[in-house]
Image (cartoon, coloured by chain):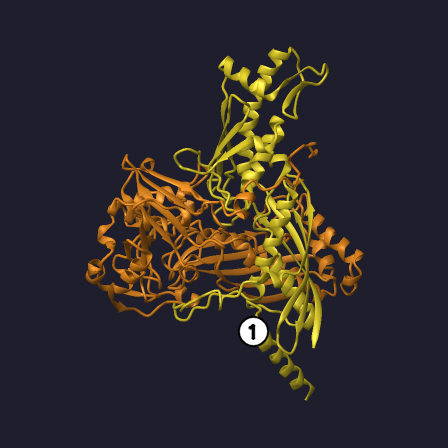
Amino acid sequence: MNRIKTTYVGCSTPKVDALDKVLGRAVYAGDINFPGMLYGRVRRADIPHGFIHEIDVRTAEAMEGVVCVLTAKDVPGNNRFGIAFPDQWALAEEKILSVGDAVAIVAAETDEIAKDAIHAIRIKYRELPPLTDLQEAMADGAPQLHVNKIGSYKKKSGGHHYPLGDGGPQHDQKKRKSEFLHNTKGNVFLHTKVRKGDIEKGFAQAEVVVENTYKTQVVDHVYMETESGVGKMDEHGNLVLWNACQYPFRDRSQIASVLGLPQNKVRVIQATTGGAFGGKEDINVEIYIALLSKATGRPVRMVWDREESLAYSTKKHAIEIWTRWGATREGKLCCMEGKVYGDTGAYAGLGIFVVKKCGIHLAGPYHIPNIRVDAFSVYTNNVMASAMRGFGVTQAAVAHEGQMDELAKQLGIHPLTFRLMNALDVGLSTETGHIMTEDVGIKPTLEKIKEVILRDGSLATYREGLM
Amino acid sequence: MKKRGIGIGSMYYGLGYGYSRPDIASATIELCEDGSVIVRTGTVDFGQGSDTLFCQIVAEELGVTPDNIQIVTPDTATTPDAGPTSASRVAYVGGNAVLNATLALKRTLNDVAESILGEKKLIFLNREVRAETSGKCISFTDLAKACHLRGVQIVETGWFNNTTDDVDPHTAQGDAYATYCWATQLAEVEVDTETGKVEVLRVVAAHDVGRALNPSMVEAQIEGGVVMGMGYALTEEIKQEKGYRGEISLGEYMIPTSLDVPSIESCIVEVPVPTGPYGAKGVGEPALIPTAPAILNAICDAIGIRITELPGNQKNLHRLIQEKEKKTMGSEN
């Protein structure tokens, strides 16, 4: 591709938002004030798994300054929502699947009163043993955390959910069913199979084999600005909401469904947002603010504390990857087998896509002719995992790069040389059989690092065997 | 004892949603009578810099300055849907939508300028439109005014559909993504074998971004990603016990501080993708992905221990070092 000569593109022009941010002029959702504005807080479940026996909101409702307390019975529209499919409750109906599930919400004249009020709400539970281990959750006969099948979710769905089987003209609904929600086995709601070449033949050719299990942990996004938003009803009966977000249109569709309003009566406006990294893709404050604004007719603001954000926002998936790689003595990768288990916690969020992306990136930027990978997304009673920067590939890279260095060591080839020998190039294919064309760029990045190693005296110890 | 090690990590990342997930963006552009320009698009800029990129793209095509362009904040009532800011897709998908809207407006401007100047082959540069051969020109402001007086269409919509074909559901084989981002990073670490503490001394990050639309913003993405990747490799973890998480604060959840940030050398590599705006791919997520693998490989290079369970924090690494020492002593006996 010819490089086009440009004037502004390719130049480091200053960021258009920089000055407002450094001068403190940018308006974040937590800075927005309206006359008569109330403060919202969430009363969360204290247990990871169980049934709600009783919710007593009387003391909270009677507190001076408390304007309203809402529970599931007060939700005007569909009480279910979720990005991929609506498996989350706006307000818990009878079952708790994770510590922090929203049971009640409060709007009060001050944030302090709202905080006191949520503590005054009494919840009685009938506890169930939590399912927190991936293998236990996947076992035949494990308690099903979600009794609804995809079919019934779809019927109830009011929103703009990423469709499972009808996302585009290319979809074949029947075929898709084989991939999503294998209800026959535990709590697995996605099983992606990658089958490339002939795995048996591949391992028959392999002269060196490396097998490892990699376990990655749950982490948080820790954006500078925690989850926040402000909402109010306008003079036309529309809900207007300002929030820290990544996609106002999907927030809109999820809010509208819960409020029982058409989507054109819900207006979502992005306030200046202080980072997101995937953590502001799922609904956080929006539905609570919308419900409280609609119920009180007054503006409502909700800003999560840092502790609340760390404990209850969506997280990066803990993924367990077992993988076995084979190469010839000469250093050519010939096969890769893997099993990927993603703990998405109590609700799917974007978990189906994250774990799938991990599975289909497990081979890394290398050409491997024979591949078999199975990736599973699993429900547990752990914290809900969804999107975070890297989206499954961060976890895959921990595994594939560990394997590459271990293989290189066994083969006695320099790790960088070994990568160059197997890097994808024009005409070679990825794990999904995608044949590369002119835009494949892995070798130039390896060459660049090689250049630095050869140039820089302090990296001399890393030169041995580098070709 | 303090031991140094060097390691590398590579990655590829399918840009956008891939395998038939809907992946669109739209934008409208409006030319005001005074020649200033309004762009409305639902693309969220949460700090990564898309508003700046869009100003650069419009300025580039119309030959005006970036400060001549106003990007309207995403609002479901006033801006068109541009999909989520995720999947490192914004420069590519959102950028193409803005570019398409701009090119549509430019065609109208070009027609009007041709009729005014009586010339073909026009160049949009320095706030004027100039005929390449004769040098005759009209200022951008006068051209905008002429468009308004003639009643030509000065609002245009750009759409970009990045929805790919699906992969085979039984084998996941197929062209899963429109394009891919590529990267290799090198990390140099120092491991204290007494305490298990790891210090990252240096990271060199080579990223193929297709075309760096704004090099300093690409570097900023890489630097932020590297630091986030350090936390992922070495310190960060949300602990859970039977489904309970307890009280968590930034006192216990350790993210790297500015004092932990090593020297980061960003190397921008440009292998353009013909379908990207000016050849651009993405960098948002790739920035972070190779860091943890490079650090883990560097630790292994330093002390011969392969960390397979994250995080490789001081406590975990200290335990692994002790286990290895016991094993070595055992075999010596």
Q: Which residue is mark 1?
A: B316
In the foreground, A454 or A341: A454
Q: Which of the chains is yellow? A: B
Number of numbered labels in the structure image: 1
Residue B304 visible in the current orientation: no
Q: Position of residue A376 (x, y in %)?
A: 46, 58
Q: Which of the chains is orange? A: A
| Quadrant (top left, top right, bottom left, bottom right) of the C terminus of chain A | bottom right
Residue at 64 percent of width and 44 percent of height: B209
SS at mark 1?
Answer: helix
| Quadrant (top left, top right, bottom left, bottom right) of the N terminus of chain A | top right
Q: Quadrant of the rendered structure where residue A102 is?
A: bottom left
Q: Position of residue A136 (x, y in %)?
A: 40, 68
Residue A224 visible in the current orientation: yes
B245 in relation to B127, above or below: below
B330 in relation to A428, above or below: below
